[in-house]
Image (tube, rainbow, N blue to C red):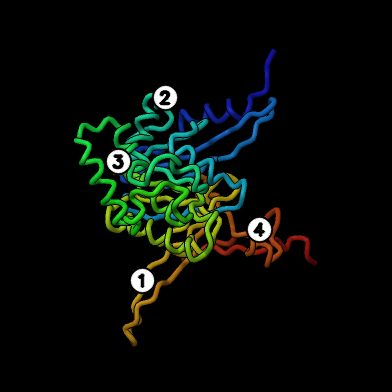
């Protein structure tokens, strides 16, 4: 008797031939045809459907997408909190598919830092700001003397402009102060990557700007690679690179670069949106584009000398 293969079976078979030799070899984060399938009551749902992503060392990147797009699933995988079903995922030389539970614990303590959306989830309520920061250093097995841990905590609090909170417990701080202390906690062990899941989701716009300034400070002054998941277009607009995820795949990417006007000498930041092309030649066109032109089911293509033309299907027209 034969049985039909499940999504998980198919994904695991695809893993054997998953990645091109050398793909992402110079990236700090590499996701190659990443798949994550969840099973509930015998029903399988594919949260990530062959997602590709490269993040270079030192980048400050935003991942954007609607609820259910797969961005939080991706974040949990990169944080070592979840395991991919298939594909390839590497962070700072760590293969996220082959790590043991012990490896994952060490990975979370030393390689990645994480900031949650809920301010109450980031800090222990009975510890001061300084004590919250020194705790992960102690848990990492650091052999440095205790005063070195305290110095590290005070340096981070000063860097993120919350030095006056060193002896305060979370309930004695504002939401913005709590999140900046949380960033300091995530940076305590000098991680290769700092991950943040909707870190400004519970804050007003003015406080959110302060939190993003803290991330920018960590990126520029410490050189920490930072990946922020957000649905807030204002946050996405603050980074040089914003990657949109839709239906479990990377769909579009916005790159911002500085350009100087040759006439006036003024420097402006210019943004350009790109559709992501996977290795099978597939791309996701932005929904607002396809809706505006009434595109659905199929489109007409024409190869030109320097571009590909895409038009609505007109085969049914007289």
What residue is shown with label 3?
189
Is label 3 or label 4 in front?
3
Query: Label 4: few (<14), some or many (≥20) within 10 Å?
Result: some
Q: CA distance from mark 1 to mark 4?
A: 35 Å
What residue is shown with label 1?
258
Q: Are marks 1 and 2 in contact (CB under 8 Å)?
A: no
Q: CA distance from mark 3 to mark 4?
A: 51 Å
Is label 2 or label 4 in front?
2
Query: Residue shown at 35%/56% (left/top)?
Result: 162
Q: Nearer the viewer, residue 307 or 86?
A: 86
Query: Residue shown at 70%/61% (left/top)?
Result: 313
Q: Are marks 2 and 4 in contact (CB under 8 Å)?
A: no
Percent across and percent down for residue 279 are 48, 45
Of mark 3 and mark 2, the one earlier in the sequence is 2
Would you identify the image quadrant in which residue 78 lies? top left
Above or below residue 73? Residue 176 is below
Q: CA distance from mark 3 to mark 2?
A: 20 Å
What residue is shown with label 4?
299
Is label 1 or label 2 in front?
2
> Element at badge 4?
strand
Above or below residue 42? Residue 202 is below
Of mark 1 and mark 4, the one earlier in the sequence is 1
> Which disc number belongs to residue 101?
2
Q: Are marks 3 and 2 in contact (CB under 8 Å)?
A: no
Of mark 2 and mark 4, the one earlier in the sequence is 2
């Amino acid at each position: 008797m034969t049985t039909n293969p499940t999504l998980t079976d198919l994904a695991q078979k695809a893993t054997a031939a998953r990645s091109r030799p050398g793909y992402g070899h110079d990236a700090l984060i590499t996701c190659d045809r990443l798949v994550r399938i969840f099973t509930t009551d015998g029903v399988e749902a594919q949260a990530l459907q062959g997602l590709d992503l490269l993040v270079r060392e030192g980048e400050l990147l935003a991942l954007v997408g609607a609820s259910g797009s797969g961005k939080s699933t991706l974040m949990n995988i990169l944080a070592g909190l979840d395991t991919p079903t298939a594909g390839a995922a590497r962070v700072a030389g760590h293969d996220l598919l082959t790590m043991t539970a012990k490896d994952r614990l060490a990975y979370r303590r030393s390689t990645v830092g994480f900031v949650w959306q809920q301010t109450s989830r980031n800090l222990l309520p009975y510890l001061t700001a300084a004590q919250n920061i020194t705790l992960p250093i102690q848990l990492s097995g650091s052999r440095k003397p205790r005063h070195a841990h305290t110095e590290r905590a005070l340096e981070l609090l000063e860097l993120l402009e919350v030095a006056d909170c060193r002896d305060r417990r979370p309930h004695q701080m504002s939401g913005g102060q709590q999140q900046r202390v949380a960033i300091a906690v995530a940076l305590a062990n000098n991680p290769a990557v700092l991950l943040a899941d909707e870190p400004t989701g519970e804050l007003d716009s003015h406080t959110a700007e302060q939190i993003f300034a803290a991330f920018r400070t960590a990126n520029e002054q410490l050189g920490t690679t930072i990946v922020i998941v957000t649905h807030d277009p204002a946050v996405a607009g603050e980074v040089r690179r914003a990657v949109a995820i839709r239906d479990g795949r990377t769909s579009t990417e916005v790159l911002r670069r500085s350009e100087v006007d040759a006439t006036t000498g003024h420097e402006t930041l210019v943004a350009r949106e790109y559709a992501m092309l996977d290795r099978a030649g597939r791309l996701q066109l932005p929904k607002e584009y396809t809706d505006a032109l009434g595109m659905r089911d199929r489109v007409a293509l024409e190869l030109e000398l320097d571009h590909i033309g895409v038009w609505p299907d007109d085969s049914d027209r007289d």
